[in-house]
Amino acid sequence: MKLPSDPLAPLARTDGEVVFDEAWQAQALGLADCLVHAGVISASQWAEALGEALRDAVRAPDDMETYYKAVISALEALLQRSGTVGTREVAARKAQWERAYLNTPHGQPVELCAGEE
């Protein structure tokens, strides 16, 4: 399968601008959508959790980064509340991502396996 040179190209608006600044933003919202469709969380639970995370971010700058950080926060909270993912598992995965990021040369895509101990 040949991947496009610009992975965000399929998400371009009609004016040519991409909807997402980075692929992980689309992936985070896609994950939320998949969880709703799989019945792991309900659409109303997702809306409430995202609203709560956005209210908590009220002191942060009102920009897209703040929004997507709230998306991640809401996903983590919902998965922890549902028992799907535990607090320890989230902390371990965050640490693995940090190690992967630090072990990846600048300009290269970060892969989770680079953070394995």
Image (cartoon, rainbow, N blue to C red):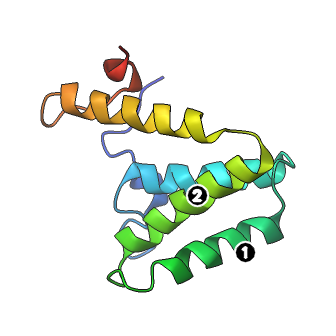
Q: Residue drawn 72% across and 73% down?
A: 47
Evaluate whether residue 66 shows in this view.
yes
Q: Identify the residue position indicated by label 1 in the image.
A: 48
Residue 14's disc number? none
Q: Quadrant of the C terminus?
A: top left
Quadrant of residue 66 in the image? bottom left
Label 2: which residue?
Answer: 29
Q: Nearer the viewer, residue 3 or 41?
A: 41
- From the viewer's perspective, is residue 8 above or below residue 5? below
Q: Amino acid at mark 1?
A: Glu
Q: Is residue 16 visible?
A: no
Eye-nearest disc, 2 or 1: 1
Callout 2 secondary element: helix
Residue at left offset 73%, top offset 74%: 48
Callout 1: SS: helix
Horizontal side of 85 relative to 65 (left or right) equals right
Label 2, label 1: how far apart the Cα atoms are: 15 Å
* Residue closest to the far left: 106
Badge 2 amino acid: Leu
| Mark 1 closeness class: few <14, some 14–19, many ≥20 residues within 10 Å | some
Few, some or many residues within 10 Å of mark 2 (<14, 14–19, 20+): some
